[in-house]
Image: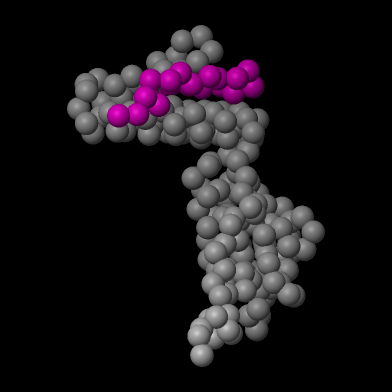
């Protein structure tokens, strides 16, 4: 089993953590999150760090031990410094722009695609082809970034579409490449 659950969670200075029975409330300069911990786990505060302890050594308890420790750690990091995902719009004439608080994509459809603002998420556009999704909740940031990505998935033959920045795509060879390589 993983040893992640046994690690301590460091709580930096601007972040405040309050523990109320099974609710852990994390508050920082970027926002506030509440995590409800299952009955078999207990969060203990010791000076400037937190420890997640489990009541027994059952397999189910061990598996959620590491999960909830990491969820609390992600909350502490997110309220201090926001999580972000960068999306790149690739293709001739494909663009993204910010309209008030909504993202507007031109990705090869007959109409622009508007992605509405989501509470707890901030959008930013760099240039005409990079959209930045940021927020204090890591799970929500990843979910919204994926929803934006599936507006126009990258084409497997040309690579056009919306992709994560730094994502490696496997481009398939087209019919011409197959026909040229085939013996006569």
Residue 73 in percent (x, y) is at 49, 29
Residue at image coords 51%, 83%: 182
Residue 122, above or below 149? above
Depth check, front residue: 112 or 25: 112
Residue 66, above or below 140? above
Residue 147, above or below 45? below
The reply to whether the magenta stretch includes residue 68 is no
Residue 39 in percent (x, y) is at 27, 28
Q: Is residue 150 left or right of residue 65?
A: right
The reply to whether the magenta stretch includes residue 16 is yes
Toward the front, the furthest residue is 184
Which quadrant would residue 116 be assigned to in this image?
bottom right
Residue extent of the magenta highlight: 1-20
Q: Is residue 151 visible?
A: no
Residue 97 in percent (x, y) is at 74, 64
Residue at image coords 67%, 64%: 89
**Viewport quadrant of the N terminus:** top left
Which quadrant would residue 42 be assigned to in this image?
top left
Residue 45, above or below 91? above
Q: Is residue 68 left or right of residue 113?
A: left
Depth check, front residue: 70 or 28: 70
């Amino acid at each position: 089993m993983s040893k992640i659950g046994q690690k301590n969670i460091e709580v930096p200075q601007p972040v405040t953590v309050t523990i109320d029975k099974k609710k852990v409330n994390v508050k920082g300069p970027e926002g506030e999150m509440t995590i409800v911990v299952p009955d078999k786990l207990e969060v203990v505060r010791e000076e400037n760090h937190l420890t997640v302890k489990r009541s027994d050594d059952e397999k189910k308890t061990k598996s959620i031990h590491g999960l909830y420790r990491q969820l609390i750690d992600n909350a502490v990091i997110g309220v201090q410094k926001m999580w972000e995902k960068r999306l790149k719009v690739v293709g001739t004439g494909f663009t993204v722009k910010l309209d008030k608080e909504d993202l507007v994509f031109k990705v090869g459809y007959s109409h622009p695609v508007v992605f509405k603002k989501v509470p707890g998420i901030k959008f930013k556009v760099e240039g005409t082809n990079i959209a930045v999704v940021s927020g204090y909740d890591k799970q929500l940031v990843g979910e919204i970034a994926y929803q934006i990505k599936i507006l126009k998935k990258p084409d497997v033959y040309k690579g056009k579409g919306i992709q994560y920045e730094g994502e490696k795509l496997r481009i398939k060879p087209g019919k011409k490449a197959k026909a040229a390589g085939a013996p006569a």
